Image (cartoon, rainbow, N blue to C red):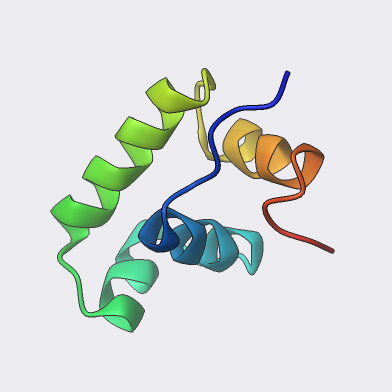
Amino acid sequence: MAHKKPSPREQQILEHLWQGARPKEIAHGMGLTYATVKHYLYRMYAKYQVTGTVQLVRRALEERWISL
């Protein structure tokens, strides 16, 4: 089932996750606080009905929001 595409900021976070970055690294690289990145992640978990980062990245690959 297709879901609403990620926002530009969510897309950036997904790309960082795909590259193996952890939330603290993402925050530093994007100039955000760790809390902000965690907030985005928890919102995306709910939005895309997943329970964690691995499932989120898998969904992003399946939906072609990020590519290999």
In the image, 23: left or right of 3?
Answer: left
- Seen as rendered, the residue at the extreme right is 68
Taking the spot 31% from the left edge, 65% from the top edge, the residue there is: 24
Residue nearest the viewer, comparing 41 with 7: 7
State the image coordinates of residue 53 (x, y, percent, origin top left): 53, 39
State the image coordinates of residue 56 (x, y, percent, origin top left): 58, 37
State the image coordinates of residue 37 (x, y, percent, origin top left): 27, 55
Q: Is residue 24 above or below residue 63?
A: below
In the image, 56: left or right of 45?
Answer: right
Q: Quadrant of residue 50?
A: top right
On the rendered image, what quadrant is the N terminus found in? top right
In the image, 57: left or right of 62?
Answer: left
In the image, 42: left or right of 35?
Answer: right
Q: Is residue 3 above or below residue 53?
A: above
Taking the spot 67% from the left edge, 52% from the top edge, the residue there is: 65
On the rendered image, what quadrant is the C terminus found in? bottom right
Q: Is residue 18 above or below residue 5?
A: below
